[in-house]
Image (cartoon, rainbow, N blue to C red):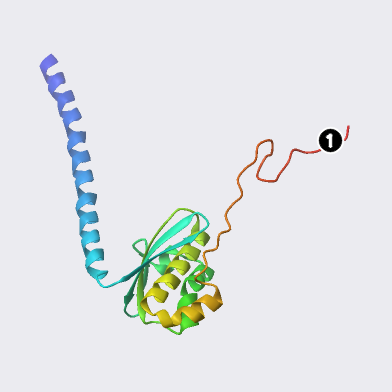
Amino acid sequence: MAEVKKTATAAKKAAPVKKEIAIKAKPKTAAVKKTEVAVAKLSGATYATGKRKDSIARVYLVPGKGNMVINGKPIAEYFRRPVLQMIIAQPFGVTKRDGQYDVVAMCMGGGLSGQAGAVKHGISKALNMREPDLRAALKAAGFLTRDSRVVERKHYGFHKARRSTQFSKR
């Protein structure tokens, strides 16, 4: 009986290890395939980096039909608020290039508003690099200037950046 218990526990220990290996193997192959497809689609693309608040966006601009993919998702799925979608589309509206370019962007850091601003900045810089004659329109709209406003740091002796302790007269 002691031998049966040992083999049963040994089988229980061995089974989860096999499951973990199988689970880990699937995402690696899927990630490699996605990367290969993305690299193949981006050949001949114009690259630019956009920044806003704490967000950084790597933007690839390719001639196409106006499709936008952000972090592997369509724009309507990643940025659900119409205001954020409108912000990203502004450089194309100002330059009258709606539906002429596909955008592939990778965002990191910050929140959705900062990421939308970073993608807009990156698209503007990429359009400027691809078609230098658009610079005047993009510059006049203020899309080529990096918005340097960031959150102020917390200061010593304060609750937040400027929030002080409550004053008590007595």
Image side of residue 35 versus residue 156, left or right: left
The furthest residue to the top: 2
Is residue 66 visible from the viewing direction of this image? no
| View extreme (bottom): residue | 96
Q: How far across and how far down the image is residue 116, in percent?
A: 48, 64
Question: In front: 123, or 26?
Answer: 123
Q: Residue at x 52, y 76 (%)?
A: 139
In what quadrant of the picture does the N terminus appear?
top left
Direction from residue 151 to residue 132 in the image, left or right: left
State the residue at coordinates (37%, 65%). 105
Would residue 139 be visible to someone looking at this image? yes
Whole-percent x, y for residue 73 in the image: 36, 64
Q: Could you say whether the residue bearing mark 1 is in a helix, strand or loop?
A: loop
> Dot 1 surroundings within 10 Å: few (below 14), some, or many (20 or more)?
few
Residue 102, located in which quarter of the rendered image? bottom left
Q: Position of residue 155 (x, y in %)?
A: 65, 40
**Residue 87: percent from the left, percent from the top?**
51, 71
Q: Is residue 122 left or right of residue 29?
A: right
Type of residue at label 1?
Ser
* Residue highlighted by disc 1: 168
Q: Residue at left 47%, top 56%?
A: 55
